[in-house]
Amino acid sequence: MQLFVHPESSKYEHSYRKTRPTVLDEIPLDVIRVFIVPCLDYNSRINLNLCLPSWDRLSKRMDKKSMEMHDFKVVSQAITCVQYKILDSYEDTTERFRLFTKLLKMHLLPRYFNIISSNEGYRNVTIRKISEFIDTCVTYKGRVDFDTRLRLVKICSKLRKKLRIRDPM
């Protein structure tokens, strides 16, 4: 095991231990900062910084556009995850109602509501689905208890009201 120490300072002594060389050892730091870092997303920047010694790590903040893109990706993945759970629970109708309630409740949060606000197609589908859910819950004759259906209707009406107030189209 080799121990690398920054030549100008002894405060980094024993703080960075390297067990094997990486490709980043052969690339100059200027090349990493100018050509590689601008192409990375948030998580990749974190991983790159973990591969570098502490004295070479990049402390530059991400620009606002990159942060918004990263937030959009994270929110989209969370919504997609719940949607896949809904698809997987096709047999259990009570679980499907709970997952639909969870999905629509997520959209009430400002972070998730921005997806509806910024994407007109997704907004139109959401409004159409809200109407379908309300109609379905009122006329549903299955094994789902009344409280679960009522909870879904309440969340649907809150989201529809929020859509009408915030983004009237």
Image (spheres, grey):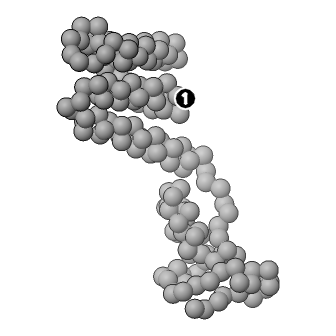
- Quadrant, the N terminus: bottom right
The secondary element bearing badge 1 is classed as helix
Seen from the viewer's position, the closer of residues 99 and 128 is 99
Q: Residue at x 42, y 41 (%)?
A: 78
Residue 131 appears in the picture as rendered: no
- Residue 167 in the image: state x and y as whole percent: 49, 18
- Quadrant, the C terminus: top left
- Residue 155 in the image: state x and y as whole percent: 43, 18
Residue 143 appears in the picture as rendered: yes
Q: Residue furthest top?
A: 138
Q: Residue at x 53, y 66 (%)?
A: 47
| Quadrant assignment, res 92 | top left
Q: Residue furthest bottom?
A: 2
- Residue 130 in the image: state x and y as whole percent: 34, 17
- Residue 70 in the image: state x and y as whole percent: 50, 48
Tell me how many marks there are: 1
Label 1 sits on what residue type?
Pro
Q: Say above or below: 164 vs 121.
A: above
Q: Say above or below: 117 vs 43.
A: above
Q: Residues within 10 Å of mark 1 (few under 14, many from 20)?
A: few
In the visual, does 154 lie left or right of 110? left
Q: Residue at x 30, y 29 (%)?
A: 95
What residue is disc 1 on?
110
In the visual, does 33 lie left or right of 76? right
Q: Residue at x 21, y 16 (%)?
A: 142
Q: Say above or below: 143 vs 5.
A: above
Q: Say above or below: 54 vs 163.
A: below
